[in-house]
């Protein structure tokens, strides 16, 4: 049996959030070949390179937004079933025209709902199950059970409102170092290179490495076995959680329920502002002392 799973949200975190239901489908369709159709920004080919449940990964950008190209691709691959983690008419219609008989999708009209719970409930309906397990794991050959003293500091983010102030990261690293010496790994991308330079310059006597020049593939090898992740709600937080690294995520501008798919993410929000959603603009309300009191449990 050949199966296509379509996941159209663009980020690394989005890919990780949907990975438990994707795995649930794969495990419940015995011996099925599972392909994923998603977006390049998910970095799926690097993140899921060793995933035993996924055969091929395809990117929507390959088809240049052409419905005809996508129809031809799906028809050529002769998929038996297609699962669409998305609302709307476009993808179900494309699959229908391509000759797919078994098409599963959320529905025609988008609803305001918890994306984690929606994906799980959809799987229960699609697979006709009363109960399913949704463990979250990123499969890597270099994952180790030996925990080192590295701490991943997540300085990245999809926008400035989702980033903790740089001076807070500097103060936090200083406070952690007073408790015990660690090696700190700054997790970010091209947009965070300057932030990484500022942090390293402010703390010249502390061992600090940066991932800002590395690929996701290289970064995963670097952070495997780390003691914990502390930082913004970003792709590296989700990756660390998938590597079984306790991940303290700072939620001041994104809904905390985005982290509810795994118990490896410990969401931290402002003490006096528990209702956080898009546009809350509350990252600077999360204090260094609040974060330190939580991470002391693992450092």
Image: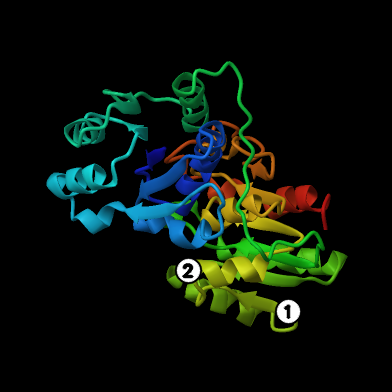
Question: Which residue corresponds to the image point at 56% horizontal and 63% vertical from the top-left?
Answer: 155
In the image, 233: left or right of 9?
Answer: right
Question: Which residue corresponds to the image point at 58% horizontal and 69% vertical from the top-left?
Answer: 219
Quarter-of-image position of residue 4: top left
Observer-nearest of 149 and 161: 149
Q: Which residue corresponds to mark 2?
A: 189
Q: Which residue corresponds to mark 1?
A: 207
| Coordinates of residue 131 in the picture (x, y in percent) | 61, 20
| Coordinates of residue 35 in the picture (x, y in percent) | 40, 47
Would you say residue 195 is visible in this rendering?
A: yes
Tags 2 and 1 touching, CB below 8 Å: no
Numbered disc in front, either 2 or 1: 2
Q: Secondary structure at mark 2?
A: loop
Observer-nearest of 210 and 97: 97
The image's mark for residue 177 is: none
Please, which residue is most extreme toward the right here?
A: 179
């Amino acid at each position: 049996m050949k199966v296509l799973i379509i996941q159209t949200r663009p980020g690394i975190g989005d890919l990780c959030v949907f990975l438990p239901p994707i795995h649930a489908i794969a495990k419940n369709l015995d011996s099925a070949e599972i392909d994923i159709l998603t977006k390049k920004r998910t970095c799926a080919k690097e993140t899921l390179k060793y995933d035993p449940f996924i055969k091929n990964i395809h990117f929507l950008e390959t088809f240049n937004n052409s419905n005809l190209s996508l129809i031809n691709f799906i028809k050529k691959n002769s998929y038996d079933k297609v699962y669409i983690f998305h609302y709307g008419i476009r993808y179900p219609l494309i699959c229908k025209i391509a000759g797919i008989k078994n098409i599963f999708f959320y529905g025609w009209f988008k609803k305001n709902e918890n994306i984690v719970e929606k994906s799980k409930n959809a799987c229960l309906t699609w697979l006709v199950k009363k109960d399913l397990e949704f463990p979250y794991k990123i499969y890597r050959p270099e994952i180790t059970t030996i925990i080192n003293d590295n701490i991943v500091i997540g300085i990245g983010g999809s926008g400035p409102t989702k980033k903790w102030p740089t001076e807070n990261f500097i103060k936090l690293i200083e406070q952690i170092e007073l408790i015990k010496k660690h090696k700190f790994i700054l997790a970010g991308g091209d947009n965070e290179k300057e932030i990484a330079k500022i942090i390293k310059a402010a703390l010249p006597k502390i061992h600090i490495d940066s991932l800002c020049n590395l690929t996701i593939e290289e970064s995963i090898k670097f952070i495997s076995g780390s003691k914990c992740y502390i930082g913004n709600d970003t792709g590296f937080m989700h990756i660390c959680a998938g590597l079984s690294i306790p991940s303290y995520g700072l939620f001041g501008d994104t809904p905390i329920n985005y982290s509810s798919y795994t118990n490896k993410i410990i969401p931290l929000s402002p003490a006096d502002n528990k209702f956080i959603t898009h546009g809350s603009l509350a990252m600077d309300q999360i204090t260094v002392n609040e974060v330190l009191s939580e991470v002391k449990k693992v450092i």
